[in-house]
Amino acid sequence: MPSYIRLALLFLCAAGFAAQVNAASQTASVKATVVKPLTLTKIQDLSLGTVTLKPGNWSGAAVGISRTGVLSCANGNTICTGSAVPAQFNVTGSNSQTVKVTAPNVTMVNQGDATKTLILTVDAPATISLPNSGSKGLDFGVGGSITLSSTTANGTYSGTLNVTVDYQ
């Protein structure tokens, strides 16, 4: 058989296979959301002011300030004076985005005796929503409370409040 006939037969066979294969296609949408990096700025530190313990034998007296600035010290065993303020932060990022706020509890150490500690139970918002316009961002507060007893050592207690923000 001449080579041109073989070539023609090969071409016809290949064309027949191609006609039998059914091709399928589909489309999909593509989307990407780009957001600005978040920035977090501290505006003010948290302070519970001065707490005076009353005499007697007692425990479980919670003293705190909410993230909105409401002081709680009405337990009968403590007297709170001085300036009590929540920590204040400002977060900026992309408009209208939800931001997750995390802030673990804080171990506060007595500056006169490092063996004495208090735990500040943090009161922070779980999420905040950035405004839909402007670059000022959003201010938010973080509060917290400590639990005292008649045997709590006197002194100045301090610690570090670690706040983290991330897009949700």
Image: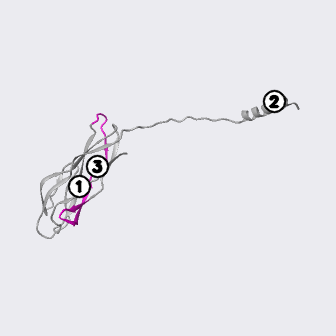
- The 10 Å Cα crowd at callout 2, few under 14, some 14 to 19, many 20 or more, is few
Asked where in the image residue 78 lies, by quadrant, the reply is bottom left
Q: Secondary structure at mark 1?
A: strand
Tell me where the magenta segment starts and ends, as one range: 107-135
In magenta segment, residue 12:
no
Question: What amino acid does circle 2 point to?
Answer: Ala
* Position of residue 55 in the picture relative to residue 88 (left or right): left
Say few, some or many: other residues with alpha carbon within 10 Å of mark 1 (under 14 / 14 to 19 / 20 or more): many
> With respect to residue 8, does 162 lie above or below?
below
* Amino acid on which disc 1 is placed: Gly
Q: CA distance from mark 1 to mark 3?
A: 11 Å
Mark toward the viewer: 3 or 2: 2
Q: Earlier in the sequence, mark 3 or mark 2?
A: 2
Which mark, residue 144?
1
Label ID, residue 48? none
Which label was assigned to residue 125?
Answer: 3
Quarter occupied by the C terminus: top left
- Residue 8's tag is 2
Q: Nearer the viewer, mark 1 or mark 2?
A: 2
Residue 26 position, x and y percent, is 58, 35
- The quadrant the N terminus occupies is top right
Q: Is residue 2 above or below residue 69?
A: above
